Image (cartoon, helix red, strand yellow):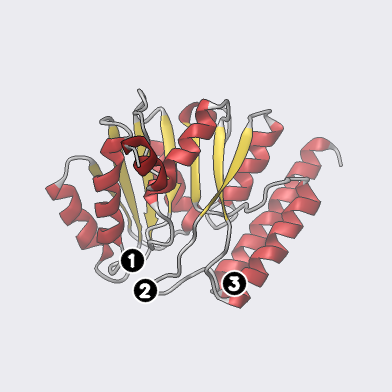
Amino acid sequence: MSLKEKMEKLSLPTKKVNKKLSVVLPAYNEEKNIKKVVDSILKFIPAITQSYEIIIVNDGSEDGTGELIDELANSCEKVIPVHHSSNRGYGAALRSGFRIAKGDLIFFTDSDGQFDIKELPKLMDLIEEGADIACGYRRKRADPLIRTINARIYNLAIRVLFNLRIKDIDCAFKLFKKDILKDISLGSDGAFISAEFLIMAKKKGYIIKEIGVNHFPRREGKQTGNNLRVVFKAFLELFRFWKKIRKYSGG
């Protein structure tokens, strides 16, 4: 097997990109996961580009996540810590990361280790092929049944209300051109932010492409996606946004 074939088998890129990459990691009570995730990114990203930054947003964690993030930042200049004094929500954490990102491309994923950074080149390829936004979709979702059911209902509601034909709207494995943020104003504090971003991008005419990625079971820590407060907030933001869109479109 040739070197190129081995790299392709490992999902490693065969060439680097000549662009700065910002990696945004929202983190809430991820003390047991955050270091492993950051270490895996630091080990892999130089294979793609030497110009990168890792922005970790501690969203008011109640465990040792904040302290770990500061330790990681002290040991590596590529790591940039951001701290929320209280838990403001997934969307708020992402927006804080996006706000200070300096990369030409912005990639975001979760801090729980359920995705493999080695699959990032798949998204890079979509950008090179003309996409403005490259979205991963989970080929096989490794979540509890109730969360999977909630996600299907949520995705169906968004598809019906906004005609957004995306396979896995809230998959936390997305790469996009930073300039899009100059044209789109995001307001969601909760999990609706992914849908808000894609809905607005579609309305603005940006090209969105998808590709399948692996999804792994959470090994450590507690998921918040099944939390009734989180689920309710996502649906509440969804319907508020729908009413806002209808108002401005005269619907």
Q: Residue 134: x, y in percent?
A: 55, 38
Question: What is the number of the mark on residue 221?
Answer: 2
26, above or below 202, in the image: below
For the N terminus, the image quarter is: top left
Query: For numbered disc 1, what is the local secondary structure?
Result: loop
Residue at the extreme top: 18
Q: CA distance from mark 2 to mark 3?
A: 16 Å
Contact (Cβ within 8 Å) of mark 2 with mark 1: yes
Q: Earlier in the sequence, mark 3 or mark 1?
A: 1
Residue at the extreme front: 1
Query: For numbered disc 3, what is the local secondary structure?
Result: helix
Q: Residues within 10 Å of mark 3 (few under 14, many from 20)?
A: some
203 relative position to 18: left or right: right
Q: Which residue is mark 3?
A: 147
Residue type at mark 2 is Gly
Residue 155 picture quarter: bottom right
Q: Residue 18: x, y in percent?
A: 35, 23
Identify the residue at image location x=28%, y=67%.
31
142 relative position to 36: left or right: right
Q: Which residue is mark 1?
A: 30
Question: What is the number of the mark on residue 146?
Answer: none
Residue at the extreme right: 251
Q: Residue 203: x, y in percent?
A: 71, 33
Query: For numbered disc 2, what is the local secondary structure?
Result: loop
Q: CA distance from mark 2 to mark 1?
A: 6 Å
